[in-house]
Image (spheres, rainbow, N blue to C red):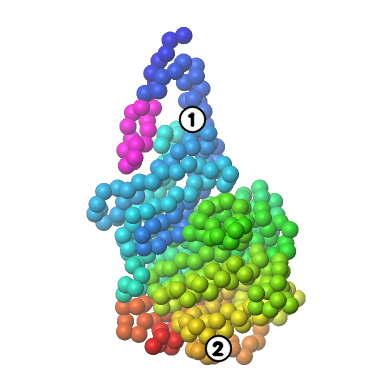
Amino acid sequence: MTQEGVERRVFLAGGVAAALTVTGAPDALAATGAAEAAAAVEPPVGPLVGHVDHSAARVWARPGLEPSLHPDWVCVYRRRDGVGGPLRTTGRLSTANDRTLLLDLPGLRPGTAYDFTLAPTVTAAGFTPLTGGFTSAPAPGAATRVTLGLGSCAPSLPDRVWTRIVDEGCDSFVMLGDTPYIDSSDLTVARRKHREFLAQPELARLIRSMPVWGTWDDHDFGVNNSLGDHPGKAGNRTAFVDYRANASFGHDRNGKRLTGRGTGEGVYTSFRRGPIEVFLLDPRWFSRTGASWADPARQTCLGRVQWDWLRDGLKASTAPFKALATGMIWDDKQNTESDDWGTFAYEKDAILDFVAGERIPGVFLVGGDIHVSRALNYGPRVGYDLWQYIVSPLHERTIPSLNVPNPHLVHSAVEPHVFLKLVADTTVSDPTLTATWINRDGRRIFEVARTASGMGHR
């Protein structure tokens, strides 16, 4: 049997298609062609823009192609204003991470818009390259204005709440948990529910157009009201890191920050977006698994390693505004459930005592979970007025019974399809932080406006 050359199209670095001649027996080449024609074994999910700072970004996708046929991928990214040439980075589909791709994009300029294309290095029949874009974070300390969206308790069906978030001008978004609802310890089920969630068309538009970070709450950590003694948490952590692109995912068994997607402890992370630094805490994984660092006679919530990480991060932060964000609320829900900071008030108080003792300005609290939106002012608890912003739900199911009285309550609303829009502005003499609760129809529910001087800055 003679050898014959078959021309195949290949994406070279830079995204330019070129011809590559592959030789082999005709039957073998025909089999290869048939395999390529059937390579798109599942619909693609993503791309998702994950962590983005002022110099680098992370991009995630599940292209739906067979890794054995198309293991190698290239991401070509370029400035939207056309300045400079294309940049490129390469990576491989990970079978260990449910056939997903996670790529780091270095060499970004601060505050600059980029577009990107993801494609296999060898083309697959019928596969359309995946495209997206984002704007890198402003340089730390630069006078700027950023708009961060936050939300919890999300639908896994098409919903225009995601369109409203984009149309409101949010340049980034934080998923505060129950994003999505999994309620299973089966890894196959968890991965499928993450896929179905990210594939919803309105959400798909959002995640490919702005940075997205996430933590979990009870329904994506495990089941309702689950904490660190939940026996199925390891599988749900695997699914979480398979389908997110945070800068880090908790720590490894030696207590070292984990930037990869391997086995680890917790999913806590942090990021800075211009004037705001967000500490996405994980009060689920470590809770009830050992003695508290704040009170050895009681059970922990954060665990010692995460507490040390938070303490070091807060001390080092130069951001005017610092969010301590979790899925669960920073109070007692006043129902039969124990997954709230009221159960671990001794660690909450230790955190706030640390903020006050170190005179750390700009701190505020963020929570979700309860299917009610609220704003509470605890007065000068940390040397200046400490506020908590609770935003929930993104979906339609509210729980009016959890809108309980509280002496610190300033605003509340039992409102479906709501998200929080945070605008931080350091272009003015006294930087401002404006929090607005908005529903999917664009109606303003309530608003809290604050200044840097009112948050401990002198």
Query: Which of pointers 2 and 1 lies earlier in the amino acid sequence?
Result: 1
What's the magenta bit mostly, secondary-structure-wise? strand
The residue under label 2 is which amino acid type?
Arg
Disc 2 + disc 1, Cβ < 8 Å: no
The residue carrying mark 1 is: 36
Residue at x 31%, y 78% (from the top left corner): 427
The residue carrying mark 2 is: 381
Dot 1: few (<14), some (14–19), or many (≥20) neighbours within 10 Å? Answer: many
Place residue 119 in its image quadrant: top left
| Left or right position of 179 against 53 | right
Tell which of 90 and 450 is nearer to you.
90
Q: Give the range drawn in magenta.
A: 7-20
Based on the picture, tell me whether residue 356 belongs to the magenta stretch: no
Task: Judge depth for marks 2 and 1 and give the one in front.
Answer: 2
The residue under label 1 is which amino acid type?
Glu
Based on the picture, tell me whether residue 18 belongs to the magenta stretch: yes
Q: In which quarter of the image is the C terminus?
A: bottom left
